[in-house]
Structure formats: C-alpha cells, structure tokens
Image (tube, rainbow, N blue to C red):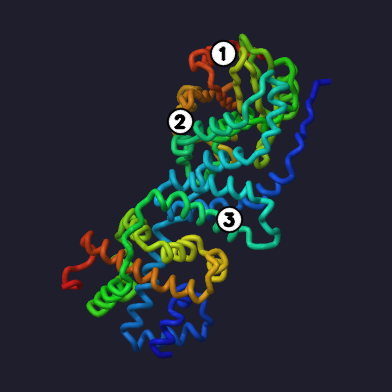
Amino acid sequence: MFPIFSAVIPQDPRHAEFEQQTLPHMEVLYNYALRMTGNKEDASDLLQETFLKAYRFWNKFEQGTNLRAWLFRIMKNTYINVYRKEVKEPDKVDYEEIEGFYNLVRDRNSDDNDLQKKMFGQLLDDDVSAALESLPEEFRTVVILCDIEGLAYEEIAEFLQIPVGTVRSRLHRGRKLLYVKLYDYAKQRGFIGKEAND
Amino acid sequence: MNCNEFKECVCEAVDKRLSEERADELMKHTRVCPHCQFEYFSLLSAKNIIHEKLKQERVPADVYYAIVNATLNRSHSSWFKKLFGFKLNPVIAVVAFAAVTVGLYSLFAPSNAGMSDDANIILQSVKNYQAVIGGSIKPQLISTEEDVHSFLTKEVTFDVNVPKMKGCSSCAGVLSSFNGVKLAHVVYRVGDKDIIYIYQASMNEAMDGHTIGLPDEAREELEKTDWYIRDLSDNMTIVLWRYKNTLCSAVSKMDKNELIALLTEKDIKE
C-alpha cells in the first residue's frame, strides 16, 4: 500500500466561486483592454489589475446582477485611474468639423457598399487599429463594445450607466468619425482615386 | 420614411436590430435618397471593417495563469512545506510566476492550426511547475522513485519514467487527465532548494496534436533528435525528450547543465 496523501486540498469556496463566475468573461475583457490601451502589455496589466480588484471586492458583488457589466466597470475605472493618466489623450475632436468633412466626402462620392469595401478592405490592420484608437474615448468605448465585442445596446448602456438612446447616438457618431479616419488612411495609402477628392 | 426617421434608426439597421418591416422601409428610403444611402453604407463599412480587421484575441496563456495564481488562496502552499521542507513565500511565488511567464506565450504559441493554448504541452508544463511551486498541485503519493513509478504505471498506458536522480531527496507523483488524455507528473526535490517537475504523456498523443500538442519547432526537433531544450526567462529550463513511447517534459530552475546531466542518467526501469 502506498502512502497516498490526501488527494483533496480544501479549496477556498470564495475563490472557487470567483473563478467559476469570472473566468468565462476574461476574453471579452482582454479584448476590450487591448483596444483601449492599444498594446498587449498594457492590456495584460489592465486585465490582471481588474481581476485582482474584482477578487478583492468580490463580497461587494451582488449575485444575480450583471457580472460582466460589473467587471467592465472595474476595468474602465482602472483604465481611467491608471492608464489614461500616463498616456496623453488624443486632441479633442471637433465633431462639427468632422461632420463637415464627412458631408464633403459624401457629396463628392457616390460610393456604394462594394466600392467602400474595396477601399477599406485594402487597409492594414494597424491602420484600422490606429483609426479606432484615435476616436475620443466615449465613442471608442461604444464602438469596441458593439462592433468588436458584439454586446447588445442594452448591455452597453448598463455597463456605461447611460440610457440606450445615448448608446445609439454615440455609436452613430463614433462610426461616422471612424469612417472619416478610415477614409483618411485609405487616401494616404492611395486606395482612393484622386478624382474622388478633387 | 423621411431623412430624420432614417437618422433615428440607421445604427440599428446596420446592427440588424430593426424589424423586417422597418428595415424594408429604411432600405426603400436609401434607394431614393443618395445622402442617406451614403450614410447607411458608410456606417456599415465602418462597422464591418472593424469587425473584420480587429479580430477577437485569445488571452495569452501566461496572463491567464498569472491571474488564476494571483487570486489563489495562499494556504494551498502548506503541502509544499511537507514535501520540500521549507515554506514558500506566497508573495514571492506570485511575483516570480508573473515574471517568469511573461513572454512564454509568444515563445511557445502553437503554430499548428486548431491547437488551443490550453493544449500546448510546453505551456502546460510551465504552468504545472508554477502550480507545484505555488502549492495548487497536490501530490497523490510521496515516496521512493520505485513506488512512484509503480503508482503511476497502474493508471496510464505509456511507459512512465521516474529516473533515480543523484542528489534527489524526495519524489512525488500525481496522475491527471486533460480532456480524456491521461497524464503523469513527477516532482523531485534536489538538494536543498531545487525542484524538477516532469510532465509525461503518450508520445503519440503529443505528436498527433488532437488533444494535447507541441509547437511546430519543438515537434520537429523532437522528431529529428528525440530532444528539445530551451532556456526560459528567470533561469528556468525546459527539456523535452522521448522515453520509449512517452513524451517527458521537465521544467526546473536548477543549473541547466546539471539538469541535463541528471535527466540523461540511466533510467531506473531500463
């Protein structure tokens, strides 16, 4: 008979519960962190800090409420408190100016979806990433959550603690801004004919 | 639908959140209003390009395990003292874990399509080594090499390798399975401080790569030479080798040359 040690080490039920509930959300949080910080190293740090904070305050989480939204809020606050201080925010975008440029592009192009697909399809992933990162935070957040993470408007509203109508309008503006940025990159890369801009 | 109504619901149309009837109305409007048509397609393009170009990324395995370890209850390290005779400072363990594992994912990210990070034997070995240090892997048997060998052999179909190593003061065995694949784990204490952890699995399973697998570089080198040795950060070394029909994967922080010398000594069962 071999001296077999206890095969079961009593696990802290608090930790087990935390792991079981929070780990399935890790990927979606990591991707959000990645798009907010713009690099994997900071995203990993932000993710770790978020989970450590969530673990520390696990007793404050109200079971039955939206855990993903709770984790997102911790991450967003951590991002604001730590990372945003260290990185210079992009200059405030003048939305009216962007809207004017958007209308100008619209008036000079009779683009259909196929043409726009061709135009943007040639862009590098880095260009798209840079265009997204250049958006003001309030627009970037909703675009990330909706278009990358695939969250419903209602969940975004819960996470950001804003009305669904505000989510909709930020998304509308965010996508318009993004279009203008992408158009700019496509133009710089020569994917848009000169005639379209003159 | 007029232009103002269009503006109210264009985002929802792009996200396919409108009823069929409402979506039809919107599309009908775009056919007669070039401005709104442009707006619809531009917003759709912006959404699609983001969705297509910025793919969901997996959490790097080292980050995942660092988080799991960092939140683990520190009391799990108590068995470590029993086996190895000294208590590990949990703070140091966590910091060391985080430091050591940074970069592991990029080093050993599997290039073979279809293999998940969890199934990567190298990442599993390093994670298990850290779990041994952190106390979250529990020994099922602590005994002589012969006893550990007999204990592990009863449960697996491959040839378990429990070499008798010079200077080893204790030996422990653990059995586990990963998605139905049986695994054997052997842990040694060498001298006062050094630990050697050896992950063992069927060589066929490892090479098939269906459930567990290796990065291409490691697999190719093993096929050619039966050995694969890599230095890791924080003075860790990983050594993979073939033992009969078994893949062994050892991780340790001891001196690399001493480790290789110990691992290449005559196996006890030969």
Q: Name the quarter where the N terminus of chain B is drawn.
A: bottom left
- Kindly check if marks 2 and 1 are in contact, taking CB atoms under 8 A apart as contact: no
Residue indicated by mark 2: B220
The image's mark for residue B262 is 1
Q: Name the quarter where the C terminus of chain B is drawn.
A: top right
Residue indicated by mark 3: A71
Residue B218 drawn at (x, y percent) = 47, 30
Disc 3 or disc 1, which is closer to the eye?
A: 3
Residue B55 drawn at (x, y percent) = 44, 56
Crowd class of label 2 (few under 14; some 14 to 19; many from 20; radius 10 Å): some
Tag 1's secondary structure? helix
Marks 2 & 1 on one chain: yes
The quadrant where residue B185 appears = top right
Chain letter of disc 3?
A: A
Question: In the image, what residue type sits under mark 2?
Answer: Glu
Crowd class of label 3 (few under 14; some 14 to 19; many from 20; radius 10 Å): many
Taking the image as shown, residue A116 lies to the left or right of residue B251, namely: left
Q: Can residue B200 be seen in the rendering of this structure?
A: no
Question: In the image, what residue type sits under mark 1?
Answer: Leu
Tag 3's secondary structure? helix
Tag 2's secondary structure? helix
